[in-house]
Image (cartoon, rainbow, N blue to C red):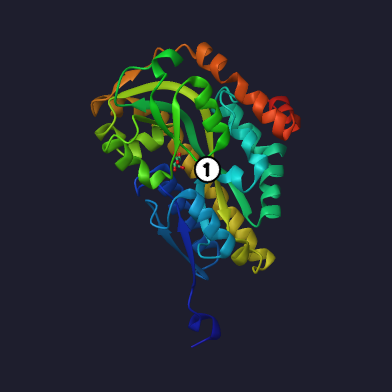
Amino acid sequence: MGALSAQAAQTVNLGHTLSDSSHYSVGADAFKETLERLSDGEFEVVEHPSGALGGERAMIEGLQIGTVDVVITSTGPLGNFVPGTYVLDLPFLFKDYDQARCVLDGEVGQDLLDEMSEHNLVGLAWSENGFRHMTNSKRAVTSPADAEGLKVRTMENKVHMEAFEQMGVHPTPMAFPEVFTALQQGTVDGQENPITVIVATKFWEVQDHLSLTGHVYSPAVVLGSPILIDGLSEEERGWFEQAAQASAEATREEVSRLERDGVELLREKGMTVNTDIDKGPFQEAVKPAYQIYTDQYGSEMLDRVRGSD
Ligand code: EAX
């Protein structure tokens, strides 16, 4: 037997929080297919969906200590590690998918990926979660006044929490793998996530009302562990970057598909969908979150995002 064929493939453990029917799994499959093909079997990707390796914050920590190799995650907990990414979490920052994708694929996106290496993470590619909408089990929400007083699970992200507080809801930060049970048991009244996640997690089983607030764009990112990536040859690293790019493209396509078909599916599953949302009052309510953000981080990144529109 030749030396190469005698060598076992190196296992790459890839984690994410969503189900194996989700847009993240579509992206994970594309990552696996691409890396295994480019490396001619030198690497074998093992997918761990559904939060099997923990919530997003825990998995990011896992990347830093090398217990997980690749993670597809929202930016939810990422600002705790890479503060530059907080700018992306500001509500009503992006007006549509085209604008958000364009910013992430441009200089701002590249600079943020580069910044990750200063924080013991490797940013491989910007992927996508989607525009977030509110769901709850109590009442139809079409204005901030309707939302007032609701207990809403938020991501572990201070920009999001601040914005929701301004809106008058009680934000309850929680890791994603705990959310379904918290909704089922009534620990919280509501949550907010893109159509993609609401579909993949079957939130219709525990939430009656969906309001298409589109209050914030939720990027996802394909991250690598520096412990793995920094030890690779340039060629090998290139394969990981191409696999991440293929993953992001496949995920974005699935997000677009679900934006077309997902709401109808949720109606069929019994959710009451409020499409008639006047975003103005929501935008007005969360404005102080911008001030709080710029007070702490300055306005340079915000200006750059807006300027690259
Ligand atoms: O990244 O925590 C969340 O609500 C995220 O949107 C979800 O884990 C997918």
Is residue 18 among the parts visible in the rendering? no
- Category of crowding for the residue at label 1, using alpha-carbon neighbours closer than 10 angstroms: few (below 14), some (14–19), many (at least 20): some
Q: What is the count of numbered marks?
A: 1
Q: Position of residue 299 (x, y in %)?
A: 74, 29
Image check: 123 left or right of 40?
Answer: right
Q: Looking at the picture, tell me which residue is in the foreground, 6 or 28.
A: 28
Q: Is mark 1 within 8 Å of ligand 1?
A: no
| Three-letter code for the amino acid on which mark 1 is drawn | Glu
Q: Quadrant of ligand 1?
A: top left
Vertical placement of 100 versus 120: above or below? above
Q: Position of residue 21 (x, y in %)?
A: 34, 45
Q: Residue at x 52, y 41 (%)?
A: 76
Residue that sits furthest to the bottom in the current view: 1
Q: Residue at x 43, y 42 (%)?
A: 174
Q: Residue at x 71, y 29 (%)?
A: 295
Q: Position of residue 45 (x, y in %)?
A: 46, 63
Secondary structure at numbered mark 1 = helix
For mark 1, what is the residue? 249
